[in-house]
Amino acid sequence: MDNKIIIFGSGGHAKVVLELLEELNYDIIGFIDSYEKPGIEKYGYKVLGDESLLSLCLQKFNTTNVVIAVGDNNHRRDIFQKLYKLNADLTYPVIISPNSVISKRICIEQGSVIMDGVIVHAGCAIKQFAVINTAALLEHDCNIDSFVSIAPRASLGGGVKIGENSYIGVSSTIIQKRIIERNTVVAAGSVVTQDMPEQVLVAGVPAVIKKYKYSNPNLFA
Ligand SMILES: CC(C)(COP(=O)(O)OP(=O)(O)OC[C@H]1O[C@@H](n2cnc3c(N)ncnc32)[C@H](O)[C@@H]1OP(=O)(O)O)[C@@H](O)C(=O)NCCC(=O)NCCS
């Protein structure tokens, strides 16, 4: 197995992904990050340069493995689309913490990351480039679409569906069988008891719609 990998992004989320990769014995080549000076060291590894250098680096180190370690859903999706155009042959391994409890009866697609303490029960499906963050719980038969983030300690009851690109805030709860459509944000600590439409901000206990046509470029500010 090719265990070499390049990390795209070098911020806070990348730092946690990096430690996961170390635990999984990946051979980390370095970071690609256009916001950092090439050649500097971060967390003990080199910033190799921006994305224009990615193909060259992969060639040099004889690997195709990349992890897009960017917490923001839109940004992660944009990077994937850009990289796909640059090089359709890149591979994006699924990264699963050895300190998580994951049923063997789940499907999980390329580029998704499962952090420490996560529990995923039988029948769940996790599409590409999702982030299931620290200590989140996915009960049986949940459906997580592409580029979704489930923040730390969020709990999803059985059969919950989360639409593409949606963000489920830290310590929020979604009761069983509810559907959150695409591009929606569930605020921290909310309890969702009803289906929610696309591109809204919902918050509170029980959660109500606070904003329509919602987009928040500063979700992590
Ligand atoms: C929702 C959030 C993104 C703020 O977005 P925003 O667009 O700036 O929202 P505002 O602060 O304008 O709040 C809009 C409304 O939602 C309410 N609200 C916002 N966050 C809330 C929360 N966590 N719980 C309850 N109500 C909340 C506000 O009180 C306001 O209500 P009002 O219109 O009745 O006065 C932020 O509060 C949040 O929850 N972020 C998630 C953080 C997280 O999960 N981090 C994990 C990182 S790993």
Image: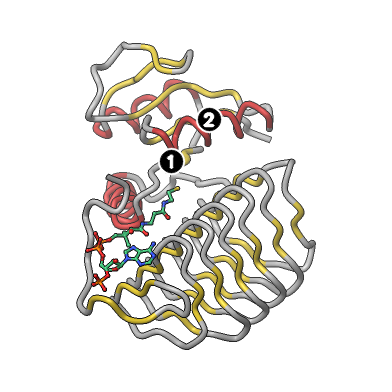
In the image, what residue occupies the spot 55% across and 75% down?
174
In front: 204, or 17? Answer: 204
Q: CA distance from mark 2 to mark 1?
A: 9 Å
Q: How many marks?
A: 2
Give, as a three-letter code, the residue at label 2.
Answer: Leu
The residue shown at (24%, 32%) is 52
Where on the picture, by quarter, is residue 23? top right
Of 121 and 203, nearer the camera is 203
Give the residue drawn at x 57%, y 75%: 143
> Are the two marked residues, 2 and 1, in contact with CB atoms closer than 8 angstroms?
yes
Quadrant containing ligand 1 = bottom left
Q: Establish if 52 lies above or below 143.
A: above
**Residue 144 or residue 7, whichever sits in front:** 144
Q: Is residue 122 left or right of residue 177?
A: right
Within 10 Å of disc 2 (Cα), the crowding (few <14, some 14-19, many 20+) is many
The x and y percentages for residue 217 are 21, 55
Residue drawn 46% across the image and 38% down it: 66
Residue 125: name its quadrant: bottom right
Q: SS class of the residue under badge 1?
A: loop
Q: What amino acid is found at the position of numbered circle 1 in the picture?
A: Ala
Which of disc 1 and disc 2 is earlier in sequence? 2
Query: Where is residue 164 drawn, in percent x and y?
Result: 40, 71
In the rendered image, residue 19, in percent from the top left (x then y), is placed at 58, 29
List the residue tagged with mark 2.
18
Q: Position of residue 85 (x, y in %)?
A: 28, 51
In the rendered view of the protein, which quadrant contains the C terminus? top left
Location of mark 1 (residue): 69
Please, what secondary structure does the residue beneath circle 2 have? helix
